[in-house]
Image: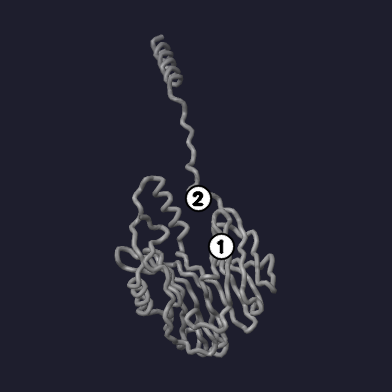
Amino acid sequence: MRCTLLALAALSLTTTSLLSAPPAVKLQDDPPTVKTPKSGDLTGRIANPAKVADLSLVSRATRQTYTPKTWDRAAGRFTFASLPGDARYDLIIKTTDGRQIEGIDLDFCDLRMVRMAAERRKELGLPPERTQKFSADDAKAITEWISKLQDFMEIRRPLYIHGDGRRCTVLLELMRTREHYAGSGQFVWRVELWYFQNEYGGWEKVPNQERVLRRNRIAPGEWSKIHLEYFPELSAQVDQAGYCRPIEFTIPDKGDLSRGRLPNTQPEVKTPPHISGLDVKGDGDNN
């Protein structure tokens, strides 16, 4: 009898506790920091369209290529339609005299994540990350770092150095002309994007993030025919809202060795790199 009374009392207490307990809290995820991007069109004009043999577009991130929806050869106007948003695209022009001119995306490799992290810090009331302006001394330090590197390649020539605060992107040409494991009589020729970050006063290459644009094992005679140049102004961003600034470009009358590789030039040449982003804080920096 006593056990029965105790059981009834416990049941009554449990029921009372359940009835008086606060309602359950419904858990929900935070809204996304960045909205889903919209697709958009990339438009533009080539001022001297008679020099254009072919026109295309590439995403370096996905390696997907695109053909223009419209291409007015008389006016030089083009449209690449319905491109995925929040993405960068590089225009590729093949000229009637055998040149290849390409856009080049010099944004930092994780720039989108850097921007998202900066927005999240603001939302959480956290202090911004350490800031820094990219200087000529920074560009010099990175150039020296590259020149002192000892690896399989014997020639390393920076073409572009783009600073973004304490981050930096370098487009460079790499070559090996000496004999190597694959045999003699061939050059190893590459064009790559390298990414650097300044950590507490020193520049270091971001490991395993380099992007290979060209990689050829090629006979010297064939290599000497290459005519490839890069222009950052032929790279454009379709933003989250689907907007993209138009590209306006005039094909130069002759090639510029400092922007790539021209035919019948020596493997080891000295050209100054094109430096941009000086004295500007990066996209992920605040203040």
Q: What kind of residue is marked 1?
A: Arg
Question: Between marks 1 and 2, how big is the CA–CA gap?
Answer: 21 Å
Q: Nearer the viewer, residue 272 or 120?
A: 272
Q: Is residue 236 left or right of residue 143?
A: right
Q: Residue at x 42, y 85 (%)?
A: 270
Q: Secondary structure at mark 1?
A: loop
Q: Nearer the viewer, residue 216 or 270?
A: 270
Q: Residue at x 57, y 87 (%)?
A: 225
Q: Position of residue 176 (x, y in %)?
A: 46, 84
Which quadrant of the rendered structure holds the C terminus?
bottom left
Q: What kind of residue is marked 2?
A: Val
Per the rendering, the mark at residue 184 is none
Rendering quarter of residue 16: top left
Q: Secondary structure at mark 2?
A: loop
Q: Position of residue 118 (x, y in %)?
A: 41, 53
Q: Furthest residue to the top? A: 1
**Of the residues tagged 1 and 2, which is closer to the observer?**
1
Classed neighbour count for the residue bearing mark 1: other residues with Cα under 10 Å, few (<14), some (14–19), many (≥20): few
- On the image, numbered disc 1 is attached to which residue? 245
Q: Nearer the viewer, residue 230 or 253?
A: 253
Residue 22 visible, this angle: yes
Residue 152 visible, this angle: no
Rendering quarter of residue 18: top left
Q: Residue at x 45, y 18 (%)?
A: 15
Q: Position of residue 285 (x, y in %)?
A: 38, 57
Per the rendering, the mark at residue 34 is 2
**Is 107 placed above or below 28 here?**
below
Classed neighbour count for the residue bearing mark 2: other residues with Cα under 10 Å, few (<14), some (14–19), many (≥20): few
